[in-house]
Amino acid sequence: MRIVIAGAGEVGTHLAKMLSIENHQIIIIDPEEERLAPIKDTLDVLTYNASATSIEVLKDILQKKTDLFIGVAHSEDTNITASILAKRFGALKTIARIDDTAFLETENLEFFKSLGVDSLISPELIAAREVLNLLHETGTTEYMDFREASSRCSSRNSMKGPL
């Protein structure tokens, strides 16, 4: 699978690591060279030091069949614009990271799909849902019984005589 990631911050870097392990062809775009340097030194990915909204760069990258475009730059404007352009240049599926959760309302999702953004994600909303799920879980996830171990220790100590 050929995947283009716009943004080499924490989310983009993590995605590149996870997806490159699965033998996908990964291309990561970021305008800041210092973010790309550690990625190209440690991962088997292609890097572009450019803006993800550069028409020339996207045309060049998306000439070959691209299965997935993921916009996870720090700016939701960049992610949305880059995803729209990527879809127009041939990306089969596009995902944009957003901050404004109002975009996730049903009528807004349809609007973004009509523009070419297939999915919108909000990491903060995902994290909040995970925390709520953990709070609603009841029961013990791990249990250790120390009673037997402590009784064995005390019986061994009582068998010792004076030195």
Image (cartoon, rainbow, N blue to C red):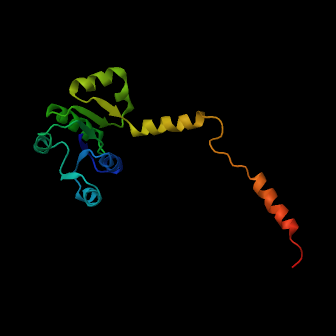
Q: Quadrant of the C terminus?
A: bottom right
Outermost residue on the bottom side: it is 163
Residue 67 placed where, x, y %?
Answer: 22, 36
Out of 16 and 132, give the one closest to the viewer: 16
In this rendering, the answer to whether 104 lies above or below 10 is above
Q: Nearer the viewer, residue 160 or 22?
A: 160
As drawn, is 62 to the left or to the right of 111?
A: left
User: Residue at 25% of width from left, 54% of height from top?
Assistant: 44
Query: What percent of the width, then of the height, locates residue 47?
Result: 21, 52
Which of the 4 quarters of the picture holds residue 115?
A: top left
Q: How many marks?
A: 0
- Of all residues, the one furthest to the right in this rendering is 162
The N terminus lies in which quarter of the figure? Answer: top left
Residue 143 drawn above or below residue 129: below
The residue positioned 34% from the left and 29% from the top of the image is 103
Q: Position of residue 81 (x, y in %)?
A: 21, 36
Up the image or down, 153 lies above or below 60; here it is below
Residue beneath the point at 53% across and 38% down: 131
Is residue 18 or residue 100 the one in the foreground?
A: 18
The quarter holding residue 32 reads bottom left
- Foreground residue, 123 or 44? 44
